[in-house]
Amino acid sequence: MTLTTRLERIPPAEVRLAEDTAALLQAMGIVVVHLFGPPGSGKTSLILRTVESLTGKVRPAVVVGALSSQAEPSPLDNLDLPSVQVNTGGQPCLNANMLREALEKLPLADVDLVLVEEIGTLTIPVEHSLGENLRVVVASLPQGEDCPSRYPEPFAHADAIVLNMVDLQPYLGFDRARFQQAVRRLNPQTPIFELSCRTGEGLETWWDWLLEEARGRAS
Ligand SMILES: Nc1nc2c(ncn2[C@@H]2O[C@H](COP(=O)(O)OP(=O)(O)OP(=O)(O)O)[C@@H](O)[C@H]2O)c(=O)[nH]1
Ligand SMILES: [Mg+2]
């Protein structure tokens, strides 16, 4: 007789918690955007440029994942808005429990939009949500045009893709059309925002999309 035991990657209690978080956010009209990408792709820079522009239009807050309590302080800690740093205790990424605990530490009655910076990695299980509304991959030119083909899962499950550091194009000879084709093979519909947090190029289109998504989902 063969005895087969199937181990789920995500424990059912986590899945239920994620569903509960999603329901809570919907009831409160709060939009949570989960930003993930490889180390150094510009996640923090994008959040800084985004809250700078959106404050006054929505009430933002941030959640920042860190691998340990020894992590460098983030520039996001000094913003004049609610923020929570989550120490994952060495876990490679946030889970539904960590996100929920972080959200409960925020003054949710005074918040419309939460930007969550994931630990820098593209090897995370993204097929299940943590309860967030939107998942955004932040890639950048130094990862190469074939980054989507090397890490298909996050690109396939993203609600939007940011390609940061386009100011480096003249130095890296990055083929943007090849990057777009690689994304389209995995995710035909998702918007792709090519921008530079350094020069500001392309940021306005990203801000407009995010604001529209936030308002649309909150109403
Ligand atoms: N040239 C250029 N540099 C950028 C741009 N955006 C960010 N950087 C720089 O890239 C480095 C990494 O940016 P971060 O925003 O810290 O990246 P991150 O994804 O938050 O990094 P981790 O949290 O360590 O994974 C910093 O030195 C930024 O100043 C950009 O558009 N162009
Ligand atoms: Mg960062």
Image: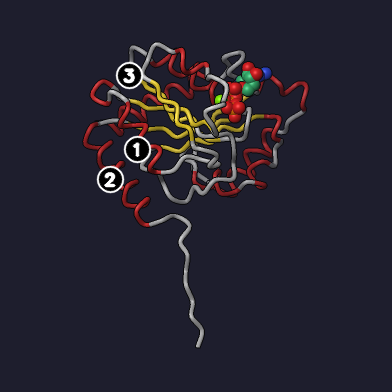
Instruction: Look at the numbered discs 1 and 2 and tell me whether their residues touch, using CB distance below 8 Å.
Output: yes
Question: Vertical placement of 190 versus 197: above or below?
Answer: below
- Mark 1 or mark 2: which comes first in sequence? 2
Question: Vertical placement of 19 versus 4: above or below?
Answer: above
**Mark linked to residue 115:** none
- Mark 2 or mark 3: which comes first in sequence? 2
The front one of 62 and 46 is 62
Q: Amino acid at mark 2?
A: Asp
The quadrant of the rendering that contains the C terminus is top left
Eye-nearest disc, 1 or 3: 1
Q: Which residue is mark 1?
A: 100
- Whether disc 1's CB lies below 8 Å from ligand 2 is answered no
Q: Which residue is mark 2?
A: 20
SS assignment at label 3: loop
SS assignment at label 1: helix
Q: Amino acid at mark 1?
A: Arg
Looking at the image, in which quadrant does ligand 2 appear?
Answer: top right
Determine the CA span between mark 1 and mark 3: 21 Å
Residue 87 x %, y %: 48, 32
SS assignment at label 2: helix
Q: Residues within 10 Å of mark 2 (few under 14, many from 20)?
A: some
The front one of 55 and 190 is 55
Residue 208 x %, y %: 42, 22
**Mark linked to residue 58:** 3
Residue drawn at x 30%, y 31% as measured from the top left: 104
Determine the CA span between mark 2 and mark 3: 24 Å
